[in-house]
Image: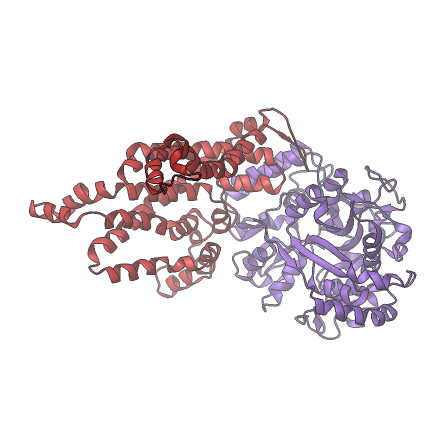
Amino acid sequence: MTDQTPSLPHAASARAPRTDSGFSLSRLPDAVTGWLLSLPLALVLLFFLVLPIAMIVVVSFWGATEFSIYPAFQFDNYEFLLTSPVTYQVFFNTIKYAVITWAITLVLGFTIAHFLAFHVRTQTWQIVLFLLCTIPFWTSNIIRMISWIPFLGRNGIANSTLISMGVIDEPLEWLLFSDFSVILAFVHLYTLFMVVPIFNTMMRIDKSLIEAAYDNGASGFQTLTNVIIPLAKPGIMIGSIFVVTLVMGDFITVRFMSGSQKANVGRLISNDVALLQYPSAAATAVILLITVLLVISILLRFVDIRKEL
Amino acid sequence: MTDTVDKKGVSRRSILKGGAALTGAALGSGAITGFPTIWAQNIKNVTLRQFGTGVSNLNEVGQKVKEDLGFNLEMTALDSDAVTQRAATQPDSFDIADIEYWICKKVWPTGNLQAMDTSKIKNYDKIVGIFKSGKLTPESVIAQGTAPHTVGFVDGPDGKTFAKEQTGWMTLIPTIYNADTLGIRPDLIGRPIESWTELLNPEFKGKASILDISSIGIMDAAMVCEAMGEIKYGDKGNMTREEIDKTMAIFTEAKKNGQFRAFWKTFDESVNLMASGEVVIQSMWSPAITAVKSRGIDCVYQPLKEGYRSWGGGIGLSKSLTGLELEAAYEYINWYLDGWVGGFLMRQGYYSAVPETSKLHMSENEWGYWFEGKAATGDITNPFGDVLAKAGDTRDGGSFYERMGAVACWNAVMDENQYMVRKWNEFIAA
């Protein structure tokens, strides 16, 4: 965050009125102004991001009884976590959900954004169609998620339609309370987070570049792979970060859509919190945080977002 | 995470109305006889904050308190985990804790609750034996688990450890209890169900469910494993690590074989699973059965030959309650046991701690159906007006003594609780 400060002092000193009397920012050296300007954000981040995370790390070494936690420095929580085969299974599940959801939302999001940016000619229609995509967000995501349950159930609309069409004889059991329903809900909930940043970067692509590619005899596919995808990369990365972090941190979608039968890391944490096992929850949270940071740093290896924006 | 429902019905208008109604109500109900009339003046300004699980935190009770006693009762409904958490960690956030006995075992050592003087409880002598000696009738055998009387008394006002017999200092005043069993959809099963083993019967593959609240779920699981003859427990309410491992192994295998359609954590989930036909046999709570039935769907709270898993709740007082508020709380407790609430709860299928006073607030037909297990002579409606049974129907499981006499195990918290919770989490994640 502090990397942005060097550019700020100029703006500040340019705007500060040049008066001879009284206190003025322009009298302070540039470096001091820069620090002062970044101070509010730094304080907010310190108190609401750094301190809570530090607290979580500290508590993850504490011990717990049934109804209280006591300060200690012990590795019990990590030991239990890292030696239990269930932990690995749950982390594997979490990553599986993240990867599958990411792949599907990427294909969907990219296609929708591409359509909006390049096939819809007028800006009015672009805005209208874009707003259309956001309509589901007018209701809470819990409601959007739960509304799938009667639809996919054993005697739900999907099954009864398929049966009456003669496609199947027996209701499909795997439609609900399965990995399928979990991923379906994730895709439904998070595709827009992929559409928005990709659409945004695509809108900035200079149309003349595409014309140039066309003039040089590139096919539609070649234009896509050589011009559009490389230029839309920052949008794709931002969308990916949104989707991956949202899916990896989720617990409620997995609980409802799997009928509590599947678990991801978020559910491990929420179960621990519900049972007053804060230290164990904190330890799981620390491991999850490390995993997510690793995933994001890998993603950022591919694209330097700051440079591209 | 937990849905908190703040049920506050306090407006200036209702306070004024309550004040006017107070004189009449107080004389009429006789609820506050024995207390100096001066209370009537100050008590209007008292607000008691009660929290607990949804079962007995009903708006109607708050309104009736206002009418009969004149003071305000603010109620917050939470799930059992959240209730435990709040009672253990935020003693100043409540005046009255409406908790279950097994939660009391967990929370009492924190010192956040104060013992109650039974000499101030008017109907103490009429409270059923389960909560005092542990015996329903003199011949009864005490069931396994955290039986209410084992955590019902402490040695004195500051006692930290539970007493073995009645001491005059009670931890919780019993309010509501019931015997739980499996709920079934007879129309989709089409044959009699008699044993807990049916929960894991492959016939119901993909159509069974169990509740995902570890401390209760493990008991249902234990009832099943014992009925199958797979495990012989020393005490289902206080299992050894080995017993926990074996129980969870049997259930994990069943889960992997696709026995369960889903697990449920809230009342509504259990109702929806059953009503939609996703599940035909599952652990269930009595009012959930009622909710399914009121949608016109056939659902039975099936008595099983191995007996019931029972639970009981009571109200405890916060340590910080003193003076006028404390007196108001005692008055509230006396009012609670006086019969109106009892009748209100019994007409929903629960039992009241002092049945004989509740009888006065029920019709003969209702009393016969709910308590004595007799055939209804007319429509049985719950307090909200839904028809639950027609003339000629009898209650599943029969009379109070048949049902509460067949309790095999009480909801419990084990010595190996933390180990059990971890194993349960593994089962859910497996």
Left or right of residue A309, residue A169 in this image: right
Residue B240 at x, y percent in the picture:
69, 33
**Residue A124 found in image quarter:** bottom left
The purple chain is B
**Colouring method of the image:** by chain
Residue at 80% over, 59% down: B336
Of residues A31 and B217, the one nearer the viewer is A31
Q: How many numbered tags mark residues here? A: 0
Residue A172 at x, y percent in the picture:
42, 55
Left or right of residue A28, residue A282 in this image: right
Residue at 27% over, 52% down: A113
Left or right of residue B200, residue A128 in this image: left
Q: Specify the colour of chain A.
A: red
Asked if one can make out residue B193 in the rendered structure from this viewpoint, the answer is no
- B263 lies above or below B244: below
Asked if one can make out residue A126 in the rendered structure from this viewpoint, the answer is yes
**Residue extending furthest front?**
A21
- B254 lies above or below B282: above
Residue at 86% over, 61% down: B39
Of residues B57 and B206, the one nearer the viewer is B57
Residue B427 at x, y percent in the picture:
56, 39
- A72 lies above or below B388: above
Residue A226 at x, y percent in the picture:
17, 41
**Residue extending furthest left?**
A216
